[in-house]
Amino acid sequence: MKTIIEPFRIKSVEPIRLTTRAEREEKLAAAHYNLFALKSDDVLIDLLTDSGTGAMSAKQWAAVMQGDESYAGSPSFERFKTAVQNLMPFKHIIPTHQGRAAEAILMALIGGPGRTIPSNTHFDTTRGNIEASGAEAVDLNIAEGRDSQSLHPFKGNMDLEALDAFLADKGDAVPAVMITITNNAGGGQPVSLENIRATADLARKHGKPFIIDGCRFAENAWFIKQRESGQADRSIPDIVRDCFACADGMTMSAKKDAFGNIGGWLALNDDDWADEARVKLIQTEGFPTYGGLAGRDLDALAVGLTEIVDEHYLQYRIRTNEYIVERLDAMGVPVVKPAGGHAVFIDAKTWLPDMDPLDYPAHAIACKLYEIAGIRSCEIGSVMFGRQTDGSEKPAAMELVRLAFPRRTYTQSHADYIVEAFELLKEDVHRLRGFAISWEPKQMRHFTCRFTPK
Ligand code: F0G
């Protein structure tokens, strides 16, 4: 059979409230044109994020009832730890309430003024935690990763030459090397096993610990299996183990590739670092056998980790994005190619070449998509990255609209609806006007700033 079906059937449904275009125009204006300020009841298809928004399975909900809420020594923690270590063979597993809490603890250990931490591309919370500690976050993604039309199979790869030179130049200022799989901010693009290993070797050569931000490790492993020579016949869990075996630690948002609605962890091999991290954990999150989570969350994640590596799930997951990318590409909408793991990215700079980047073209497209079809997406461009630490504003490297897909949540007809929305949007797009920001907070402005249409 050539049709790839959703490899699940639906036992429990959430209704979607249908709205009219006029109603949506009114809601968006009332939200000061910030899509984060909309009520989710006013959204038809919510592609704001794939984080914590997925559907748990019947087995995960059953596991919720097994959760043991003991403050210390809960068997839920043991089940969670075993499930993590089955895929990621680290010595110490430290649960946190989400990924950014793991990052904050890690940065309390290794960050600080005068330090600099390279990665292929730091996600915005990682960058935020590094900068909050006083350190500098540096992105060393290969050049193809910034070219939306390059068909390189592993556009998330680290630029190894640049990393080698960086480590030689910065010396003791570098406390660790990081890599993000898949590269979310760079279009959900994967990193090859070869590149992960080569990055680990370079870190070792320069005497630096190597830490993986593993949020979408299963999607990354699926791409490795499909695209990397010698990997096609290997199981996803084996590929995952190889990715993490060469690292000294990892940060994780279990809201992505662990099928959690909440959760995360920090994993480390070094005993001294782990001791220090647990002290910080107790101060900020909770006791080491629950971190920032309830026992029931830990049990749901333990089951989720066994489901996320299922090949039929991963095939359906990635194919949905490929299908939308193929359809949009055929109709002339500029999309980041190849399709990413968790999201479809629209290249707004190419679609609206005449709009000033500081009129926020990707945001203008995201707003119109909501008005036309009730689809909520997210700008990843100059609204998100434009404000510099010195207070100045400069355009981001790319102006992207991200359509991120919650896991096991939407179906093929939702995908077709999204494609149809772009058919309508295409007719209007060249009449789009940009936005000005009328109010913004001091940091991470995209979540709460207000816009006025130009
Ligand atoms: N690292 C990456 C690569 C991420 O994509 C995220 C979250 C985090 C770390 C932080 O994890 O949310 O659990 O604290 N990304 C979400 C997104 C929010 O929409 O891409 P968290």
Image (spheres, helix red, strand yellow):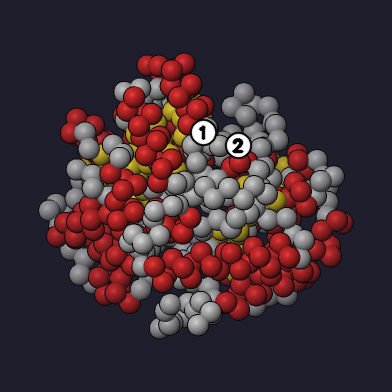
| Residue type, numbered disc 2 | Ala
Tell me the SS state at disc 2.
Answer: helix
Which class describes the residues within 10 Å of circle 2: few (<14), some (14-19), or many (20+)?
A: few
Residue indicated by mark 2: 143
Element marked by disc 1? loop
Residue 203 sits in quarter: top left
Q: Are marks 2 and 1 in contact (CB under 8 Å)?
A: yes
Which quadrant of the view contains residue 259?
A: bottom left
Q: Is residue 246 found left or right of 362 in the rendered image?
A: left
Q: Residue at image x 54%, y 36%?
A: 141
Name the outermost residue toward the front: 230
Residue projecting furthest to the left: 73
**Cβ of disc 1 within 8 Å of ligand 1?**
no
Estimate the x, y position of residue 56 in percent, counting from the top left.
Answer: 38, 70
Residue 384: quarter of image: top right
Horizontal and vertical percent position of residue 209: 32, 30
**Total marks in image:** 2
Which x, y percent locates residue 412? 57, 77
Residue linked to disc 1: 159
Residue 426 badge: none
Residue sitting at x 31%, y 23%: 207
- Residue 118, can we see it? yes
**Neighbours of disc 1 within 10 Å: few (<14), some (14-19), many (20+):** some
Which residue is painted at 54% across and 76% down in the image?
411
Q: Looking at numbered disc 1 in the image, what kind of residue is underneath it?
A: Asp
